[in-house]
Structure formats: structure tokens, C-alpha cells
Image (cartoon, grey):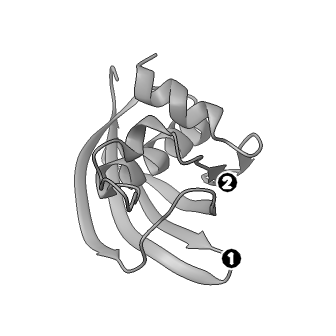
Amino acid sequence: MSVMREAIAAAAVAPPQLSGWSGEQSFCFASDFIGFSGHFPGYPILPAVLQVLLAQLVAEAISGQSLQVVSLARAKFVRQLRPDEKIDVQLDCREQDEMLRCAVTLQVGDEKAASYSLTLKRGPM
């Protein structure tokens, strides 16, 4: 497992909650989380690429397999994610054409932080 994946797994508040092809999991990243390194000094925010990786990890829990990102569409990152905030990652997925297509929402409390469509395929990480 990569260092980043291990750091993200360590930030999970609880195991993923799964139901069929849907799932959710919460994360909380301390200010010393490696993903904040350099993004940005003195004002850390969670990079969008890591917000996508959060969804990929939940999708892997849903499917029970390693997945690779194929595409990201309709991405809207509308709220900065800061240290010590509980981030809820919610996915609603479906299988289509040997791909897993997921509608993703990230929230902090009642506030939507990001939403996007993620297409993944089975394969090595």
C-alpha cells in the first residue's frame, strides 16, 4: 500500500458503510497529514487529487477490488477542506460496460464541499 493510501486509511473516522453499490466513509485529517505538505504553507487545504483518491478508496471498498481511475467529469470543488474537519465521502455506483461509474459527494456537516462523476476500471493500483 502506498504511503498516501496508508495515511488516508489512518485518517478514517470509522470503517466504510456499504449497501449494495453505494457506500460512505468519513475522514478527518490532522494538520500534519502528509497530503497538506506544500498545499499551501501556512494555509493547508486538501488537494483535489486527494479528494478523488478518497472516492477511489471507498469505491474499492464497495467493489472489493483494486480500481484505476479512468475519468473524472462534472467536477465541482466548491469548498476548501481544511485540517481537523470531518469529511463525509458518499458514493452511489453502478456497473456499466465493465466499468464502475460513481456519483460522488464530499460534505463537511451540511455543507457540500465537492461533487463529481468518477469512472473506474478493475486493475492494479
The residue sitting at 55% across, 60% down in the picture is 91
Choose between 14 and 45: the one closer to the eye.
45
Per the image, the residue denoted by label 2 is: 26
**Helix, strand, or loop for circle 2?**
strand
The residue sitting at 58% across, 29% down in the picture is 64
Three-letter amino acid code of the residue under disc 2: Ser
In-image side of 50 versus 73 (left or right): right
Give the alpha-carbon distance from disc 2 to disc 1, as whole Å.
11 Å
In the rendered image, which quarter contains the C terminus?
A: top left
Q: Is residue 79 above or below residue 90?
A: below
Report crowding for label 1: few under 14, some 14 to 19, many 20 or more residues within 10 A (C-alpha): few
- Sequence order check, earlier mark of 2 and 1: 2
Choose between 16 and 46: the one closer to the eye.
46
Report crowding for label 2: few under 14, some 14 to 19, many 20 or more residues within 10 A (C-alpha): many
Residue found at the very far front of the displayed protein: 42
In-image side of 31 versus 103 (left or right): right
The residue sitting at 66% across, 83% down in the picture is 110
The residue sitting at 24% across, 67% down in the picture is 73
In-image side of 73 versus 114 (left or right): left
Three-letter amino acid code of the residue under disc 1: Gly
Where residue 78 appears, x then y in whole percent? 38, 80
Residue found at the very far top of the displayed protein: 1
**Helix, strand, or loop for circle 1?**
loop
Per the image, the residue denoted by label 1 is: 109
Where residue 115 appears, x then y in whole percent? 41, 72
Where residue 3 appears, x then y in whole percent? 43, 21
Where residue 60 appears, x then y in whole percent? 51, 36
The mark tally for this picture is 2
